[in-house]
Structures are given as C-alpha cells and as structure tokens.
Image: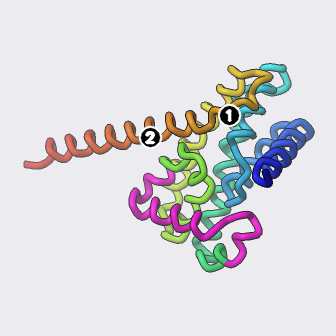
Amino acid sequence: MVTAEILANLTNFIIQTISNSGYLGIFFLMVAESALIPIPSEVIMPFSGYLVTTGKFNVILVIIAGSIGNLVGGLVAYYVGAYLGRGFVLRYGRYVLLKKSHLEFAESYFKKYGDRSTFISRLLPAIRTYVSLPAGVAKMNLKKFVVYTLVGSIIWNTVLTYIGIKLGEEWNNIRKYSHYLDAVVVIVVIIVIIAYWKKKKTTQQVNDP
C-alpha cells in the first residue's frame, strides 16, 4: 500500500513537472533518474510520448531532452564515484532511496561485463539508475562512458516514447505491463550479447594464424 502510494505521488509529480516545464522538465527528471535518484523513466518518457500525440511536444525533441538528461545525470554519478567513492554513497545514499544492495548489484554487474555494461545497463530497468557509479569508481575511460551512455539512453528513450505515442491517453497502462516490457528488453540484450560474442570469436579465429 505504501509503495503504491509513493508511486502514485511520484507519478503525479512527474506529470506536473513535465506539464509545467516542458522539455526542461523532461531533461531534469532524466538527469535525476541517472544520478542515483530512482525516478522511473517508465513514467517520464511514455507520458512525454502521450503529449506528442496532443501536439504539445515534438517526438525528436522529447528523445533528445531525455537522452541528454540521462547523459548529464550519468556523468554526475560517474564523478561522484570517481572522486567521492562508494563510501560517500553508502553513507548518504539512503537520502535518495539508494540501498547498499542496489550498489553492490551494480558493482558486480560492472565487474562482470566491464565497460560494455554502461551500454547494456541503459537498456535494463533499475540497474540503469546505478551503474554509472561503479564506472566512475573504476575510472572507466570517459569518452567510452559518454558514447555508451548516450547511445544506450537514446535506444531506451526511443522505445518508451514510442510506447507512449501508441498508447495515447492510456500511456499510464505501461505500468501494468512493465514486467513484460522488462522481460522483452532482457531477452533482446541477451541476444545482442551473444551476437557480439560470436562476432568477436569469429574475428579472433580469422586473425589467428
């Protein structure tokens, strides 16, 4: 009940922010979403997509605002990790609902998949909010971080905006089917990883004498 109430209040906050502030509202909300503050992009972008159907927004500008916001927020988390460290986050993370388990999961994910995790994670619910932090702690190459974060964010935001456009006034129903969306995204990411691994293996075999 408490969780449902919090989500309802958060949804209302997102709707009011975007309705009153337009593209800047999308930008700042997505900055927060990528800067360790769990504001759901699954609400921000579909609602913005719905507003595209009303003529209030342009679809390209919606995706740009959301993706640049993700990049800026990701850079904030990156620099927090690089210069303040995980100890700072563990100490103050509770103020933005960041749990130790969230950070540990993101860290293990980054260690397992390396730099590419910053791209893959942008397509995964929940972990996308936190993975920039361990990337900063690991001092990941900044240019790679920017490229992977931006490309992954564009893909994710395009999908969510398109869903909002297709659902129209029923955009809020995405929450009812979010677990199906999550499953589809995970499957697609697994396919991409397998395809990349096979291509890399084939290239190595060709190059080996």
Eyeballing the image, is 34 above or below 197? below
Q: Helix or strand or loop: what does disc 1 sit on?
A: loop
Question: Is 55 on the left-hand or right-hand side of 42?
Answer: right
Does the stretch in magenta take in 93?
A: yes
The residue positioned farthest toward the right in the image shown: 20
Eyeballing the image, is 44 above or below 118? above
Does the stretch in magenta take in 26?
A: no
Q: Residue at x 46, y 59 (%)?
A: 109
Nearer to us in this view, 200 or 164: 164
Q: Helix or strand or loop: what does disc 2 sit on?
A: helix
Q: Residue at x 54, y 43 (%)?
A: 123
Q: Residue at x 70, y 70 (%)?
A: 93
The quadrant in which residue 203 appears is top left
Residues at circles 1 and 2 in contact by the CB criterion of under 8 Å: no
Question: Do we see residue 24 in this rendering?
Answer: no
Closer to the observer: label 1 or label 2? 1
Q: Where residue 150 appears, x then y in whole percent?
A: 58, 45
Kindly identify which numbered label has been placed on residue 189: 2
Instruction: Return the residue at label 1.
Output: 176
Question: Which residues are drawn in magenta?
Answer: 91-118
How far apart are labels 1 and 2 at the CA level?
22 Å
Q: Where residue 66 appears, x then y in whole percent?
A: 70, 41
Nearer to us in this view, 24 or 5: 5
Type of amino acid under label 1: Lys
Question: Do we see residue 44 in this rendering?
Answer: yes
